[in-house]
Amino acid sequence: MDKLETMWEASKEYLRRMLISMVRDIDLAEDILQETYLSASNGLSGYRGDNAQAWLSTIARRCAFAHLRKAYTKAETPLPPDEECAVDCPMGSYTHLETMLVRKALQDLSPVLRETLLLKHYGGMNYPEIAAHLGCPVGTAKRRVWTAIRQLRSMLNLTTKEMRKMTCPDTRLLDYTYGILSGRDREKLEEHLRSCESCRILVDDARRVMADLDSVRDYESYTDITEIHTDGTSTTYSCRRVDNKSSEPITKTEWCSMDYHTLKNVFVGGEEIPFEIAKSDVPNERHYIARLPKPLAPGGSIVSFVVFTTPPGIGAAFDIGYGRWVAVPDNSGTDSADHMLVQMVVLPEGARLIGAIPEPQETRTGSRSTLVWKRVIPSGGEARERPVVVYML
Ligand SMILES: [Zn+2]
């Protein structure tokens, strides 16, 4: 057991970052980290004594994929990401072309339908939350999601079979497809599906649309997590998309940040990729280059996850006296397409939340408080207004 403790202490922080990059949720990553430890202690006899971090990473990835698969199954979408493939290509079995088609179709939806769908499908909001967010009735939010799915279905040519007559206009079909219909309602609908072919076709098609949406989830949804520590330093976990808009394959990605940030890791699909600091001509700026795991074809994109730390007083956390602190999390750059930004701020242990503007959609309180904001960044919009959190230490 002592052997595992030593290995664990040396790799724990790295595994934690890797898991956050995979599941994009700091609390879930913590749970999977615990599972990884248990799994490693049970399998210690199988450890061959070589690279401990690599061995533990494999176990952690397996635990993370089991969770991701469970999340997919819960939504009743038939897309369990293949374990081996998902490490290599984050889009599962989808080709670049298919991914591009889905993204194009999403962009062809009207802004109001796209926004509603992004909040539901990528933001994981329920209908009352969407309705409150958009200032519309719950029924309207539901109808918009359903209309968006039906439009995507024809844009993506997903019709499994032509329908002979008009389908029953019922948003319960959508609830059923999302797996949120239960009890007697569910039984009644299943009974109806047995006799109504049109509805059956529609449910099948909606499932395929959802599987397609899942396949581009990473490309449409950004996550920024700012974890604030008691000493005022912060760690930021930031998702960024790399698009190849040139006509040649690209093999590396470059970006800049202020020099007070320290870049710790860059991950693609749960695998760490090496980076270098390059010379920058701009004062107070740092220039980074990361080699991609494999060349990125023209028109393609990948999602990378970077982890950096920031000293106190800059960026995330300011001491404003009387034990009070203000946090203003950094948020990642946006690009021209509408996308979903999920932003989380994790307060230091023992901190007491005083207030946050705008109000978070979700506040979790465990040993540390986590505040979550979900919003759709409009096309070309600067959308730089950042949450401000006041807390007491
Ligand atoms: Zn029907």
Image (tube, grey):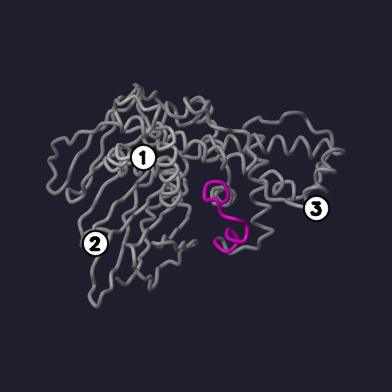
The first of marks 1 and 3 along the sequence is 1
Q: State the SS at label 2.
A: loop
Q: Which residues are magenta?
A: 120-133
Q: Residue at x 46, y 44 (%)?
A: 221
Quadrant of the image occupied by residue 240: top left
Find numbered disc 1 in the image and state the secondary structure of the residue it sits on. helix
> In 3D space, how far apart are the residues under numbered discs 3 and 2 (Cα atoms)?
52 Å
Residue 151 in percent (x, y) is at: 65, 40
Q: Amino acid at mark 1?
A: Met
Q: Locate residue 41 relative to residue 3 in the image: left or right.
A: right
Amino acid type at circle 3 is Arg
Q: Is residue 348 left or right of 206 when viewed as pictured?
A: left
Q: Residue at x 42, y 61 (%)?
A: 371
x and y percentages locating residue 344 in the rendered image: 40, 56
Q: Name the residue that disc number 3 marks.
A: 184
In the rendered structure, the answer to whether residue 186 lies left or right of residue 335 reads: right
| Residue 284, label in figure | none
Quadrant in which ligand 1 is drawn: top right
Q: Nearer the viewer, residue 196 or 4?
A: 4
Q: Amino acid type of disc 2?
A: Gly
Residue 129, magenta (yes or no): yes
Report how far apart the C-alphas of labels 1 and 3 lie in the structure.
42 Å
Residue that protrudes farthest toward the front in the picture: 1
Among the 4 quarters of the image, the one containing residue 168 = top right
